[in-house]
Amino acid sequence: MTNPKRLGLGIVGAGMGAKPHALALQALTAEIDVRGVYRRNAAELQTFCDAYGFPTAASYEALLADPEIQAILVLTPPNAREDIVAAAAQAGKHVLLEKPVERTIAAAERIVASCAEAGVTLGVIFQHRFRAASKALAASIAADAFGPLRAVHLTVPWWRPQTGYYDQKGRGTLAQDGGGVLITQAIHSLDLMLSLCGPITEVTAMAVTTGLHQMETEDFVSAGLLFANGAVGALVATTANYPGGPEMLVLNFDRASATLTAGALTISWMDGRIEEIGEPGEGGGGADPMAFPFAWHKAQIADFAEAIRAGRQPLSTGVSALRVHRLIDALMESARQGTRIRPADES
């Protein structure tokens, strides 16, 4: 029998993005029991499980039928998510879902609704919220340490090569990914920005595919933002900035400016004091999208497990994930129409 203090977990999907999850789960064995992994390619599944010491599962149905499994970690491409989550919800399994929720807002809303109707917990992986620097900044903002927010600057200057990345089947397509740099790369920083700054009421955007890539979707987006609290903002997100650099979020308040550069926070007070929290490091902004530590995934997975044990919601939920999906939709619609767009209201 599984230790009742450990969360029984099944995993479906084990592609490129599974590595930080696997490393995090190896470090969480006292809290989480990985009882099986399923991937359609049997050879690649065996290689993955051998590498991390996880048991294989004969099928997804076998994971759902295991009474010791309380939750499913979904790591498939976005186009495979809806039926997988619906089946988990119907089986009474909680779900932790790699971002994005799905390719379209309609499909994402159906996923969130299916979990709510089944009464299961839905968490969505946005590990940037779990960096020490991000958590410190969130706590300071919640305590009103800096005064009113006046301006926001978000830059995601990443690089992804054509060969080895966009040449992969389905990469950068609407059919598999649902979009380009916004929904696949910048979505992490956009989610963090919304969690710190609150909702956005208007966007004015431009989205293009540069000559550096041959792909269906956008690799460069710039936008002006208007926040509900009155702050104004500017966004630049790209995967066409060789060799790539760390994302940067700058928040200008009345009493200080806060700069998050990947995992490092610098607070510049108006009276001249400087505070530094966290450590700079790799953020996956270059050619290797997995070049970042797994500690952030570990913290988020641990939060999800504790939320289930405590009967509370995790820090990052399906509902909060819909907010960033609606923002991305508004940015792309503004670029198509060439006008200001208001993100859809929460239903």
Image: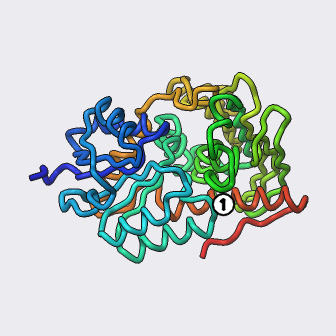
Quadrant position of the C terminus in the picture: bottom right
Is 320 placed left or right of 272 in the picture? left
Q: Position of residue 30 (x, y in %)?
A: 20, 40
Q: Is residue 32 visible?
A: no
**Which residue is tagged 1?**
199
Residue 250 in which image quadrant: top right
Is 124 placed left or right of 271 in the picture? left
The residue lying toward the viewer, choosing from 83 and 189, is 83
Q: Is residue 8 placed above or below 108 in the rendered structure? A: above
Please tell me how many numbered marks the rendered image carries. Answer: 1
Residue type of the residue flagged with mark 1: Pro
Q: Position of residue 10 (x, y in %)?
A: 30, 52
Crowd band around label 1 with a 10 angstrom C-alpha radius: few (<14), some (14–19), many (20+): some
Q: Could you tell me which residue is drawn at 71 percent across and 22 percent down?
A: 243
Q: Could you tell me which residue is drawn at 58 percent across and 47 percent down?
A: 192
The residue lying toward the viewer, choosing from 151 and 318, is 318
Q: Is residue 162 placed above or below 331 in the rendered structure? A: above
Q: Position of residue 339 (x, y in %)?
A: 89, 61
Q: Could you tell me which residue is drawn at 68 percent across and 45 percent down?
A: 172
Is 315 placed left or right of 50 in the picture? right
Q: Position of residue 160 (x, y in %)?
A: 68, 31
The residue lying toward the viewer, choosing from 91 and 313, is 91
